[in-house]
Image: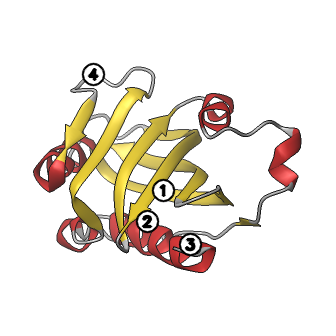
Amino acid sequence: MDYEEKLNLTHRSYEAFNRNDREGLLQLYNADCEWDMSNFAGWPEKQVYRGREGLADVFEAWLDAWEDFSYEVKQVVNLPGSRVLVVGYGRGHGRHSGAEVELGPIGQIIDFRGGKILPVDNYTDVEEAQNAAGLSEESLNIFDKHAFGAHGRSK
């Protein structure tokens, strides 16, 4: 999968997430996908979600806690092979408190297989995500970078 294909699929997934299009989002993931929250500090639920059913569970747990929530991608770094590193920010209002919250920067390492997203590893520490991706601060200039904004969504 070339960088443009990875970038396009990444962009489509965040757009679907921000529209709260859960079905459309799930269709972008491989049936054997995995969503790993074990490096996401403070995540109170399961650490790893498997398959589209597990993915639906994590998205439901996440999105139902918010009155509105959107994720803005600031950078997509092309990694060797079929992976990218995504860095961005989340912003929303708590469903019960109404408090405005901004999360980030957040790192995600996304891998692709057969034109779909397979595993996603989530990090609250972007430096930790960079290290897991095999990048050093200096090596970031070697890889292609592309930033794009995502549209906010409201329920």
Can you identify the residue that label 1 sits on? 71
Q: CA distance from mark 2 to mark 4?
A: 23 Å
Pinpoint residue 151: horizontal percent, then vertical percent: 49, 71
Q: Mark 1 or mark 3, which has the lower sequence index? A: 3
Establish if 97 lies above or below 20. Answer: above
Q: Amino acid at mark 1?
A: Tyr
| Callout 1: SS | strand
- Quadrant for residue 77, please give it: bottom right
| Of the pair 97 and 15, the residue shown nearer to us | 15
User: Mark on residue 44?
Assistant: 4
Can you identify the residue that label 2 sits on? 14
Q: Mark 4 or mark 3, which has the lower sequence index? A: 3
| Of the pair 148 and 141, the residue shown nearer to us | 141
Can you identify the residue that label 3 sits on? 7
Q: CA distance from mark 3 to mark 2?
A: 11 Å
Q: Which quarter of the rendered picture does the C terminus lie within? A: bottom left
Closer to the eye: label 1 or 2: 2
Pinpoint residue 85: horizontal percent, then vertical percent: 60, 51
Q: Residues within 10 Å of mark 4 (few under 14, many from 20)?
A: few
